[in-house]
Amino acid sequence: MWLPCRCTTKYVAASIRRGVSASFLHVLRRGRSSWNSAAFMPESAGFEGVSGRDALHDYSVSHSENFWAAVARQRLNWIRPFDAVQDCDLSQGRIKWFEGGKLNVSVNCLDRHVHTCPERVALIWERDERGSEVRYTYRELLEMTCRLGNLLRRHGVKKGDCVTIYMPTCPLAVASMLACARIGAAHNVVFAGFSSEALAERIRDAQSSTVITVNQGVRGGKITELKRTVDAAVQSCPTVRQVFVAMRTEKRVEMADRDIALEEEMLKEDVVCEPAAMDSEDVLFLLYTSGSTGKPKGLVHTQAGYLLYAALTHRYVFGYHDGDVFGCVADIGWITGHSYTVYGPLANGGTTVLFESTPVYPDPGRYWDMVERLRINQFYGAPTAIRLLIRYGDQWVKKYDRSSLTTLGSVGEPINTEAWEWYNRVVGEGRCPVVDTWWQTETGGICIAPKPSEPDAEIVPGMAMRPFFGIKPVLMDTEGKLLTSNNTSGALCMAQPWPGMARTIHNNHQRFLETYFHPYPGYFFTGDGAYRSQEGYYQITGRLDDVINVSGHRIGTAEIEDVVVSFTLFLYPYHICDAVCSDEAHLSDFILIISVTQFAKRLPKTRSGKIMRRVLRKVVDCDLEGLGDLSTLDDPAAVQEIIEGHEKVL
Ligand code: 6R9
């Protein structure tokens, strides 16, 4: 399926994306001191002869068990120590970490910090209404979690049950997730922008008997009737026994027999809630991700490995230190919200921002006003929002004091050079490293990112670059052969297991094996394509299933981008690189592609910037009846434009 590109083309295309001019290799230098692994990462103190970032990375993959055992012992509080570090076999799709160990995730995120610093702020809720933020200390969040845990227990929620959470990003949503973890139930957070059908499908697949929601949501100044959506959804969910309803606004909503007023009932509960002793491999949560086709997949994450990986990546990719304020603006309905708004920061005893609003409400200065007001140190957002904000102009950024910022993160899709440069130059004033973090719901946490690195190491715009500790990426060609050289492109796979990986697809282990482990036996297949540069850095090029059939040729979007970019080279000879432009086959590729292209101003994308390929395919097939649920789209109007454009092409 994957068409390997001519290396030269790829190289040039990659260079173009990064800007061929003077900023070709933009080098960010921070600090002069060299990297002492033990000082940098206390967990590595016992690793003999390991000094420097690269040596520590080598050690983490060559002595993976030693590495993860040391980190797991030091980073997590165990009720019972684990017997075995791992029992994994990628060729069988078997992934187990820290078996025999018992722990409680909510204790690791709350109680242990309450013992040392009860009054430290855990959450800053940046409510939709600007300037009305609310802070919750670790003590308060523990109390809220315990009351909720007791309430769920009293209503029959047991270890092994799955609770569906349909709430906006808010403290009660975080407490609900942690309350599930406390009593051993799994949670299934469904993004509160999804329709009742999308919600119902996820409730049914997860077989939830309990749903937690709010009366109304408030986002971008608009009210959404979330309780009403739940009412519609549960009509087709016979498993649902009870719905807990929190009050985000004053508005009273109709309560049926199965509905329970959350805050009212919580107040009756004790503030102490006995944590369940969970096995490392018990389920922590399911999270549905829309597959490119067909039914959404309920990816399953378990307790110890997930938490450890989220905590470690949060600490080292972003350089998070005690006392910092971490601002991840992702919704909790997305894996980014799970790992970097909730679990990573709280496991590290951090202060995390819960962003309820949008980047343009009430105006395009919202993010930076928030950075100034909350003194945010690390800001983590999506390229789609950055591109949107660029259009409004620099003045919206410059208006606010951003001196607190130390690191800027990007996630969700490739960040183009223009957006990267703007983020770096305008937002970060050129002094904050931009970390383009590549990962997936399936990987649990960040796998490839420019940081951690030696202090003076380069950061290449638009490249995720370096594998995190314990991560061993490889590239494969179409025949399934390992591509060992640099300056090459292929299918991105992982050669070794790591603790944060998803363990299965809920109710469908076979689909899990077929999707991730059968395509390249012995490897985890990410579904993405990547380019590895001469220097060994990774650049993610896009989904490999973005494949279209043109006159019998199967062509991926990355190839199309390549051809188009290199054809631009052809038109502007001052960029000419002989290897590319003497290639006649290339020109015919270009003509082939251009002759079947429909141009569009914008594509149907999800909130996190992912193109909904399913919708495009249906439009091309003229199957408008089959467009399916569009409620996961950011702007459904884009679909109408594409349909109209397609009618013209026809
Ligand atoms: C965290 C998250 C995963 C897919 C992934 C890839 C794309 C994410 C990226 C990126 C290029 C990055 N993706 N981060 N592509 N550069 N830094 O987004 O999870 O919603 O499961 O999506 O997103 O295609 O395979 P998820």
Image (spheres, helix red, strand yellow):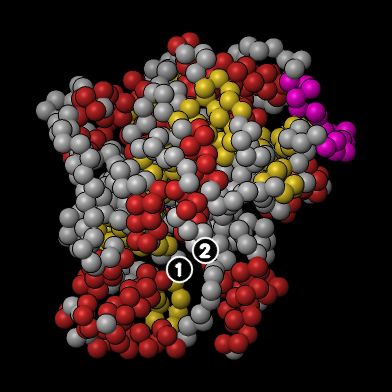
**First along the sequence among labels 1 and 2:** 1
Distance CA(mark 1)–CA(mark 2)? 10 Å
On the image, numbered disc 2 is attached to which residue? 611
* Image vertical order of residue 355 relative to residue 460, above or below: above
- Which quadrant is home to the N terminus? bottom left
**Residue drawn at x 61%, y 32% as measured from the top left:** 133
Secondary structure found at label 1: loop
Q: Which kind of residue does numbered mark 2 sit on?
A: Ile
Residue closer to the observer: 584 or 82: 584
**Label 1, residues with CA under 10 Å away: few <14, some 14-19, many ≥20:** some
Secondary structure found at label 2: loop
Specify start and end residues of the magenta stretch as a single range. Answer: 251-266
| Residue 254 is one of the magenta-drawn residues | yes
Return the x and y of residue 158 as percentages of the image width and height.
Answer: 66, 25
The image quadrant that residue 650 belongs to is: bottom right
**Residue drawn at x 79%, y 22% as measured from the top left:** 264
Q: Which kind of residue does numbered mark 1 sit on?
A: Asp
| Residue 608 is one of the magenta-drawn residues | no
Please tell me whether mark 1 or mark 2 is closer to you in this view.
Answer: 2
**Pointer 1 with pointer 2, Cβ within 8 A:** yes
Indicate left or right for 284 with 631 as reference. left
For ligand 1, tell me if the residue under mark 1 lies within 8 Å: no
Q: Residue furthest left?
A: 49
Indicate left or right for 74 with 270 as reference. left
Q: Is residue 461 visible?
A: yes
The image quadrant that residue 604 belongs to is: bottom right
Q: Find residue 546 and name its label.
A: 1
